[in-house]
Image: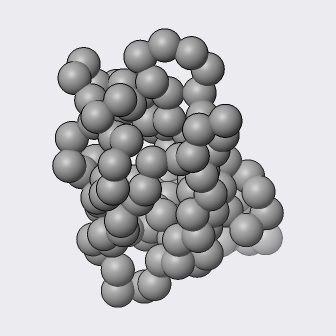
Amino acid sequence: MQDGERRNWRQHPLAKRLPILMLVAMGLWLWKGSDVPERELVWRLVGPGWSEIRTVEFQVKNADGELVKRQVHSFQRGAPDSVTEKTALPSGVYEVWVFARGESGPSRPPRVERLTVGDEDVRIERGLRVPEGR
């Protein structure tokens, strides 16, 4: 600055780089914010009654009762031996509501399963019996 001349803030070198720095910071924040690992939930369908089932719906709810995942599986000739879902779930305790429907008639009352997911859990296998009829 010469003779009391005041420098304009727009001419400062940092002001020219600020938009780029903000974009980089926002990108890092978004990238780090998605650290929720993908889990593989494997439901082994055990016991009698699965051959009559044509549709199974899984609803995963968090501790507050909010729905975090919903997936519907349909089968032409009865359910297979297992159903696999891939989903991003943080560690915690969940309730899994399982709705099963036969070829005709209303769905059966839901079966509610408790699911605990730890930090190290990548693949979680659980046995599941067919929900009881009405």
Look at 36% across and 65% down and name the residue there: 127
Q: Is residue 93 above or below residue 128?
A: below
Along the line of sight, the residue nearer the viewer: 41 or 46: 46
Res. 5 in view: no
Location of residue 111 in the rendering, given as x and y in whole percent from the top left corner? 60, 52
In the visual, does 103 lie left or right of 65? Answer: left
**The N terminus, quarter of image:** bottom right
Res. 34 in view: yes
Location of residue 72 in the rendering, given as x and y in whole percent from the top left corner? 44, 32
Q: How many numbered discs?
A: 0
The structure's colour scheme is: one colour
Q: Is residue 13 above or below residue 58?
A: below
Q: Is residue 80 above or below residue 41?
A: above
Along the line of sight, the residue nearer the viewer: 19 or 117: 117
Along the line of sight, the residue nearer the viewer: 122 or 2: 122
Image quarter of residue 24: bottom left
In the visual, does 24 lie left or right of 131? Answer: left
Look at 59% across and 70% down and name the residue there: 114
Look at 27% across and 29% down and name the residue there: 78
Q: Is residue 134 above or below residue 31?
A: above
In the visual, does 9 lie left or right of 99? Answer: right
Along the line of sight, the residue nearer the viewer: 4 or 9: 9
Location of residue 82 in the rendering, given as x and y in whole percent from the top left corner? 24, 51
Look at 52% across and 78% down and name the residue there: 116
Location of residue 58 in the rendering, given as x and y in whole percent from the top left corner? 50, 44
**The C terminus, quarter of image:** top right
In the visual, does 32 lie left or right of 12? Answer: left
